[in-house]
Amino acid sequence: MSKIEKALKKAGEDRGKPQLVAAAAKAGRTAPWTALVGQQIEPLETISRMAESEHKLLGAEELWARGIIHPEQNKEPAVQVFRELRTKINQQSQGQNAVILVAAVSRGNGASFIARNLAAAFAFDSAKTALLVDCNLGNPSVHQLIPNASLPGLADYFENPEIAVSKIIHPVGIARLRAIATGRLRENPAEYFVSMKMRRLIESLRERYRDRFIVLDGPPMSDIADARILSELSDYVLVVARHGRATNAQIESGLSAISSSKLLGIVFNDEPRIPWLR
Amino acid sequence: MQMYPEQIANALINESFQSRRLIVGAFVIVNVVMLTAGLLWPKSYTGSTSIIVDEKSIMEPLMKGAAVATETADRNRNVREVILGRSIMGKVLERAGWLADHPTALEQEGRIEQIKARTTVTPVGRDVIKIEYRDSDEKRTLFVTKTFADLFIQEMIAQKESDTRSAFDFIDKQAQEYQQKLTAAEDELRQLRSSNLDARPGTDIELSARLIALNTRIENTTTELREAEMKHASLERQVNGEAEVTVLATREAQFRARIAELQAKLDTLRLTFLDTHPDIVQLKHQIQDLRAEASAQRERRDKAKPSDGVETDETVVNNPVYQQLRRELSQSRLTIDTLKARIAEAQRLLQEEVNRGKGLHSGDARLVELTRDHQINREIYQDLLHRRERARVSINMDSDRQSSSFRILDPATASFSPNAPRFWQFMLGGMVLGVLIPVGLLFTRLQFDPRVRLATAISERHKVLVAAVVPHLWSPRELTGLRKELAILALVVTATLALSATLSVVRFLGVL
């Protein structure tokens, strides 16, 4: 945790703790299991609240129930796989933080699952932090992790020049992991990634914390334009292909959309294994 | 895609786990289907019986050398035809009670076809025939098998009798036919002989012998005639050269000869020498002397001549050689005339024989033909008579059942068909197929599904690194659900197995 965050945390404690309520009855997008909700947060209080929430971390069981890995689940093969993947990226980036685009070859291949868990794996390391950015405007999912769905996200940032970057970064109940949701989407959000603002956002996020790995939960590669732009903004690309879902043709076309120099490889997702046979 | 066995096994295990409901469902369905099939499959009993068939046709020994026996393959087919023939089948239908419900002709035909399909006739070794019959009813199986054997033997014996009888009839008919032919040939022969007395065997040989003899005689006589003529010519020449009378050599003649001789010598010398040569002179003198001597001699003879003119020269006498020659000449002329007469006679005889021979030949060819026909007919007829007698004995043997060569080797028995599927086979098959079919389908899907199911397939095909293979992350709730699901599936499988086992026991106890 950075010093600034610690300072803000302390300031936040003076102002009073945010309330914890069940969010099941909230906005339609809110996942039923979402528990942590900050009801009213002032823009200035954001970072403070994020630092604060480090104390409200979700336990291993809770995370597990939400399909997110936790360092305590050492025996879980998925945990080991994500650790290895993280290590590979670390080696690739030579210890520097990096922007990693995780994009599925088509919808339903579980890129969000991979992105989320990859971010969580980066956050395992106490010396690193991770930021999960939901770039999958067509089928967003990161907001499910964020306690309050009404908090500003990527769309709000693009639409409203007054919103600072820091206001769209939210904690998700996992140590050292933050997330940017899509926010309130317009009808036609297609042009967001083309704008210079997106490039500046990524640069700013990258520059903001040197030890932060940014994981972009990208749109499916079938949406070639977005995938290509995002891949240009990223340092590395992971292409997700799900067992029994991705076809060779999809993989072929997905791979053709990205530069081979940025391609880390394919993540073969959801391979069926008998859970008790390890 | 090249896959190692281990990869295939792993992939199949994972795929099976993923498609566990499908697998269990398929297992249950296949098992239930197989068990149902096993229960509904008609029980099959096989009745079998063996019959020794010494099936040598009665025609074969009877017609040995005159006819060709049927081959073994033909024989087996014949046996099959007899057993599955209309005659035996009709009786089987009747005796086994298939006609109890008065089926139509078409239905009867259908039942016969069914029975035929369930009946196999197989030759075992050379002379044994095995009849097998399958049916769902044990008693009926036994009965039908037994009936087949009995009817077959009856049929074959009847057929054999009929064969023998027809063989006898055939031989008898043939014998009569040949007898008629023989009689006709004899009649014709007799007729020909009576119309042509010369027409007897060997006439032509005799004739040719006589012709040869005559020819020889003519040739010999002609040779003799030539000799006689040559002798005659020679004698004539001799007679002409010989004087009728012989003149004795006189002194005058001797002188003349001497003069001529000396004259020649003189002429020779004159070619070389002059007339004055002493030799020539000497010769001239000698010649002169001799002439003088000769003239003296002539004078002396003239004085001695008889005056009556009859030549009474003492030097002239009758020539004896001449006389002899004249006698021989006469003799040879007589011989020639005799020989000519003999040749003429022989030629006349020869001509006569030739004329007779011409008449003989036309009749002779016919005779030879008739004789040959007669001979062949007689041989065949005799042979047929022998065969007919043997056939008669065979008929007697058949009527006494002495030659019966059909008997039952193995009496009919009925048991569970060895080849028919048993219930336990259905049960086991259901279990095996229940696993193999879904796993096979999964394997097929693994091979042909365009969707990727193996990480190695991606790296192989797209030449790209697989950064990670992320297994499914089971949430606690999912795990709980999975446990329940697996328990239920296990229960279903157990229930299926229990059903199989129960049905097997029940079936074994004979309840079903």
Image (tube, coloured by chain):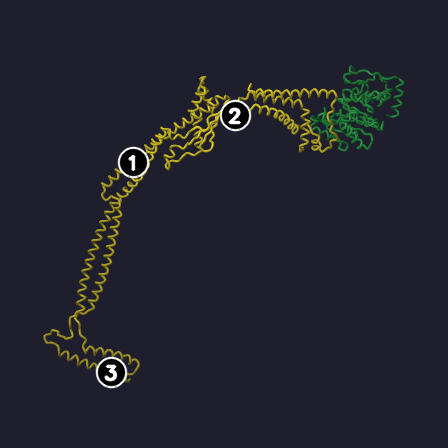
Chain colours: A green, B yellow
Chain of the residue displaying label 1: B
Q: Nearer the viewer, residue B10 or A109?
A: B10
Chain of the residue displaying label 2: B
In which quarter of the view is residue A29 placed? top right
| C-alpha distance separating marks 1 and 3 | 116 Å
| C-alpha distance separating marks 1 and 2 | 63 Å
Chain of the residue displaying label 3: B
Precedes in sequence: disc 1 or disc 2: 1
Q: What element does badge 3 sit on?
A: helix
- Whole-percent x, y for residue A268 in the image: 73, 28
- Whole-percent x, y for residue B3 in the image: 67, 32
Q: What element does badge 2 sit on?
A: loop
Which numbered disc covers residue B284?
3
Which numbered disc covers residue B417?
2
Precedes in sequence: disc 1 or disc 3: 1
Q: Are the two marked residues, 1 and 2, in contact with CB atoms closer than 8 angstroms?
A: no
Q: Nearer the viewer, residue B383 or A221?
A: B383
